[in-house]
Image (tube, rainbow, N blue to C red):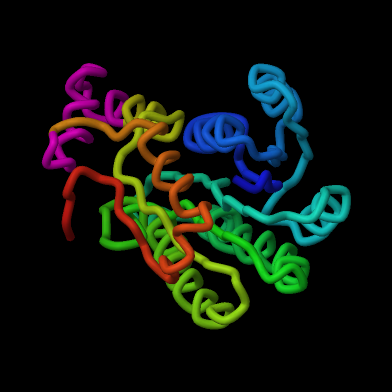
């Protein structure tokens, strides 16, 4: 196997941390990107020979600086994301723009940063971590759904643009996954409904026909598969990792 350089955004926790671990175990060089240096460094230290780079994916200047300081990228995992819950009528423009910026614009800016060098080498893998919220609607997360639908649309468009370049672009769409985002959702359900943590967790797990939450490692396994050379025929796909959940 060829040892390649992978960048994982939002690599300090949750799905990003699991993806980084899988890539390291596969033998790749990995750079973790994110806003919080201490969190990134702690995970990098646990993994071994892993680089870190502070980057706010929603800020163009920050992205440009981060990738300028990073070796050429063969595998880009656009994982950084945020979610906030509120009825649409109570969603502020600031929250709307921020969620679009982090979840969608961040994937755009980072992809744009790596494509020229990937084209020159005739090889690249871009995997966007979207969500089942990019494939269907969920109440009270309209901004997040809009952003993740945008990620899926961008994935499909960019895959066609780059189809003859040796670069593939795909999305992985997890259902409710054991991450800090879901932990916050459970706390929010508790606060608003008075349910216990177990009851709130069960409410989220109910969306999965398997009756459970997805693990970050399951998402990482799908991402890892898409980065491999033998996945070269998989392009422009939005692969759901959700136990069979449908719209």
Q: Where 106 sits versus 161, above or below?
A: above
The one of 35 and 231 positioned closer to us in this rendering? 231
The image position of residue 82, as x and y in percent, is: 51, 45
Q: Would residue 88 be seen by someone viewing this image from the given angle?
A: no
The image position of residue 147, as x and y in percent, is: 46, 62
What residue do we see at 47% from left, 51% from top? Answer: 129
What residue do we see at 72% from left, 48% from top? Answer: 56
State yes or no: residue 204 in magenta.
Answer: yes
The image position of residue 8, as x and y in percent, is: 62, 44
What residue do we see at 41% from left, 32% from top? Answer: 217
The image position of residue 156, as x and y in percent, is: 45, 74
Q: Would residue 162 be seen by someone viewing this image from the given angle?
A: yes
What residue do we see at 22% from left, 22% from top? Answer: 194
> How many numbered tags mark residues here?
0
Of the 4 image quadrants, the one containing the C terminus is bottom left
State yes or no: residue 191 in magenta.
Answer: yes
Of the 4 image quadrants, the one containing the N terminus is top right
Q: Where 215 sits versus 115, above or below?
A: above
Principal secondary structure, stretch drawn in magenta: helix
Q: Where 4 sits versus 147, above or below?
A: above
Find the magenta span and give its range.
Answer: 189-210
Residue 113, quarter of the rendered image: bottom right
Task: Tell me if 123 is positioned left or right of 143 in this view.
Answer: right
Residue 126, quarter of the rendered image: bottom right
Task: Tell me if 56 is positioned left or right of 131 in this view.
Answer: right
Residue 112, quarter of the rendered image: bottom right
Task: Tell me if 42 is positioned left or right of 214 in this view.
Answer: right
Name, please, the residue furthest toward the front. 1
């Amino acid at each position: 196997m060829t040892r390649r350089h992978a960048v994982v955004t939002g690599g300090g926790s949750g799905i990003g941390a699991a993806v980084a671990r899988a890539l390291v175990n596969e033998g790749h060089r990995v750079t973790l990107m994110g806003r919080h240096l201490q969190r990134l460094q702690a995970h990098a230290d646990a993994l071994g020979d892993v680089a870190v780079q502070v980057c706010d994916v929603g800020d163009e200047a920050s992205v440009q600086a981060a990738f300028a300081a990073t070796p050429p990228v063969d595998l880009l995992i656009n994982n950084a994301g945020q979610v906030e819950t509120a009825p649409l009528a109570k969603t502020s423009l600031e929250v709307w723009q921020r969620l679009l910026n982090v979840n969608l614009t961040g994937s755009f800016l980072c992809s744009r940063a790596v494509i020229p060098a990937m084209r020159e080498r005739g090889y690249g893998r871009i995997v966007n971590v979207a969500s089942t919220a990019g494939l269907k609607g969920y109440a009270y997360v309209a901004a997040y759904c809009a952003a993740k639908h945008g990620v899926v649309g961008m994935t499909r468009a960019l895959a066609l643009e780059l189809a003859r370049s040796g670069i593939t672009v795909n999305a992985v769409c997890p259902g409710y996954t054991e991450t800090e985002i879901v932990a916050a959702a459970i706390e929010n359900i508790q606060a608003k409904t008075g349910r216990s943590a177990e009851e709130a967790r069960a409410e989220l797990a109910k969306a999965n026909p398997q009756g459970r939450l997805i693990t970050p490692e399951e998402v990482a396994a799908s991402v890892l598969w898409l980065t491999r050379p033998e996945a070269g025929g998989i392009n422009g796909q939005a692969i759901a990792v959700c136990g069979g959940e449908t719209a």
